[in-house]
Amino acid sequence: MGEPPPLPDALLLRLHENFAEAYRVIGRSVPGGAVWESEGATAIATGVGRAEFNRLFVLRPPADAEVLLDHASQFFAAAGVPWCIIVPPGIAQSFANASAIEPGSPIAGMAMADLRDLSPRPGTTLSVRPVETPEDAATFVTTMADGFGTPRHLFDLFGHPSLLGRPGLTHYLGFVGPKPVATATLVASHGIAGVFNVSTLASHRRRGYGETMTWHALRDGLAAGCSAAGLQATPLGYPIYRRMGFRASVDYRSWYPLESLIEEGIVPPSIVAT
């Protein structure tokens, strides 16, 4: 069998919008967050002092990339946070000659084009439940941070009470007995079940828990009226999602403004070269 045909442009755009929505909902809900939209782009500041948490999503070719970047720089400077740029590959050429930005690593976007084809494998003994209380939210943040091996304070925003019960966003915790061991988040928007924040404690990996968490979110997305699904895969998760029926859909391009790299204490390659 050959490779499946490319995804329709309309579906790709909905996938891009859902990716951005996962950040929009934070920017619009959490204290210290802000959202600015213009020229086919969305800038989201979350208040976290790391560039990857504050993003300029460019979903349509800008009339002038330099002007857009200048406006975005002013927005993020007012928010007091470093930032990065995320674009689909079809728009990447618009930024090829932009000044004062450094390329970052691509982000592997994956898609399941028709959720009606859901065919989950037999489940695990993992018990999955939605996060509904501030106590659950605190446990979600701790479990996710431990699963990713990341300082907890970077993920505190995901546990903010303003996100509890927000339409289109659901956090999940997976339990083995009373112990929380896995997390996931569903962002249902634009007809897409976007799956984010899938993590499992290192001590409980290779037991299918990440897959169980993902299937749970997909079923809820289907029940919410989503017709397709999307996610951004890490190298660790990529083969799991392929087995589940996701396929590579787009490698998002990223750039980091020099000002943000310097703010975070990173010496950009262009400066080293000089």
Image: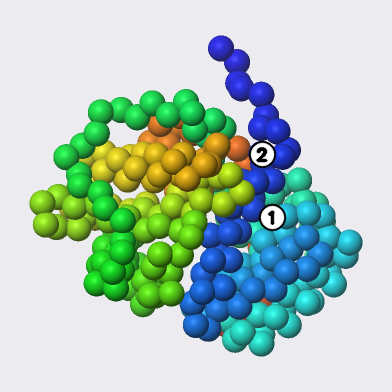
Q: Is disc 2 placed on a helix, strand or loop?
A: helix
Q: Is residue 270 left or right of residue 34?
A: right
Is residue 139 something one can see in this rendering?
Answer: yes
Relative to 186, residue 264 above or below: below
Q: Which residue is mark 1?
A: 87
Q: CA distance from mark 1 to mark 2?
A: 16 Å
Circle 2 crowding by C-alpha within 10 Å: few under 14, some 14–19, many from 20: some
Residue 212, disc: none
Q: Earlier in the sequence, mark 1 or mark 2?
A: 2
| Quarter of the rendering occupied by the C terminus | bottom right
Q: Quadrant of residue 159?
A: bottom left
Relative to 166, residue 232 above or below: above
Q: Nearer the viewer, residue 132 or 249?
A: 132
Tell which residue pokes out farthest to the left in this image: 177
| Quarter of the rendering occupied by the N terminus | top right
Residue found at x 39% / y 68%: 164
Which amino acid is tagged 2? Leu
Residue 240's x, y, as percent?
38, 36
Q: Is residue 92 left or right of residue 185?
A: right
Q: Nearer the viewer, residue 98 or 249?
A: 249
Q: Tell which tag, 1 or 2, sits nearer the viewer.
A: 2
Circle 1 crowding by C-alpha within 10 Å: few under 14, some 14–19, many from 20: many
Residue 154's x, y, as percent?
40, 74
Residue 125's x, y, as percent?
16, 40
Residue found at x 57% / y 52%: 189
Q: Which residue is mark 2?
A: 11
Tell which residue pokes out farthest to the top in this image: 1
Q: Is residue 158 left or right of residue 70?
A: left
Which amino acid is tagged 1? Val
Relative to 111, residue 40 above or below: below
